[in-house]
Amino acid sequence: MISKLKKKFIGYTMCAVIAIFTVIILGINGLNLFRTVNELDLITQIIISSDGHLHRSWGKPPSQFPDNREPYSSREERFMNNNKEMPFATRFFLVKLDGDMNILELNTENIASIEKEQAETITEELVKKHKESGWYDSMRYRFAETESGYSLAVLDATAQIETLLSVLGITLLVSAAATAVLFVIIYNIAGRVIRPISESYEKQKQFITNAGHELKTPLTAISANSEILKMTYGENEWSDAIERQTEKMRRLIIQLISLSKMDENAVSLTVEPFSLSDAAYDTADAFKSIAARRNISIITEIEGSITVTNDENAIRQIISIIMDNAVKYCSEGGTISLALKNEKHFFGKNRILFIIANDYPDADSFEPDKVFDRFYCGDKSHTSEGSFGLGLSIAASLAQNSGIAIKTDKADGRVFFTLCFDL
């Protein structure tokens, strides 16, 4: 249990670390992408506003604009004044179109990697997209309406994309390295963090074991003295009560010690192939006479020749515990059903399902998420029958040690327990 707790601590902590780094990576690269796209869109606006004459107008005051053009917006002016070297690194081509999107003028003087024919092809493809702005391969484009029709600015964004990818790679690399370092640190301190829990648990487990052995001596003495009293004075209600309570206490001690051993996987398993079908039939037969006393019917739907590889004694004990619980809590005159079937899994693997269901008058108050808790009793009226609320806890521990999935559910006034064997 302590080793599992340590693994959970490491797992949850690493999940939190990975989640934090994921948020950081997405935040940094998302903001970087947003800033870059806004900057590219602003440059395309400036290209259109300057009619493609970036070198003549970049950073100049409105009074010095060539061709008597309208002044830039304050945002454009601020950007141009802060990036005076940008015209020399900006690669673009500008297209003027009429109202029907026919090319009137094509200027490719500011880009060497695109010929006029290629620019015409790109323009025709962008016109078909019917979008004001967007991406074309590694280029950012924008359409703007003018007095004569439309202008199209296509900006080469290869350098910006490379910068984005570089930042993404750096953040991923740094996050991966930091995650690895944190894993080593967390792995080394995990033992220290859970040490107080480990020590407390070990003391508790040792106390249960010692108390169990210490209680066996007085219980044996009480049982022996009860036998002597019966031989001396004959059987009576007092001696019978002593024997019942002694036996009840003995069962409780045995169950507590069993749970204590199973928590640390101290129970040795003998794994070998056996017939699960036979185990299901035997369990059903063993409980038929007990169920008949309460007028409970047991219906079986068991496929024959189903074999699994596991500890047969552990599996039979699990089935017996669940069947005992079903008989104990089934409605009087109700029905218990056992179904064993071999169904095909999605990925071609066989999956064996063993389902035990029983009618339960108080199914609405049944709590599937608590039923395997220790000392939990869903129906308080059964506590006088010798139920300590440990049986299903033992079944769950045995199933976990045996590598079997066990779950419970409720529907239509019935309670379902399912054992799943993945083959």
Image (spheres, helix red, strand yellow):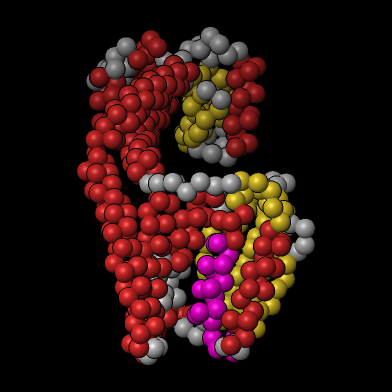
Which residue is drawn at the image coordinates 65% and 83% (left, top)?
297
Q: Position of residue 25 (x, y in %)?
A: 36, 31
Judged left or right of residue 244, residue 278 is right
Determine whether 133 is above or below 173 in the image: below
Q: What stretch is highlighted in magenta?
A: 317-335
Q: Would you say the magenta stretch is mainly helix, strand or loop?
A: helix
Question: Residue 266 or 83: which is nearer the viewer?
Answer: 266
Observer-nearest residue: 70 or 41? 41
Residue 346 in sight here:
no
Residue 95: x percent and y percent? 53, 24
For residue 323: magenta? yes
**The quarter of the displayed image where residue 248 is located:** bottom left
Q: Quadrant of residue 275?
A: bottom right
Residue with the most extreme front position: 232
Look at the picture and state if 96 lies above or below 222.
above
Number of marks in the image?
0
**Position of 410 compared to 76: left or right?**
right
Q: Which residue lies furthest to the left in this view?
A: 196
Residue for point 55% across, 62% down: 317
Please say whether residue 58 is visible from this viewpoint.
yes
Between 41 and 117, which is closer to the camera in this rendering? 41
- Please name the residue shown 75% across and 64% down the image: 303
Question: Is 222 part of what is drawn in magenta?
Answer: no
Residue 348 x, y percent position in the rendering: 72, 46
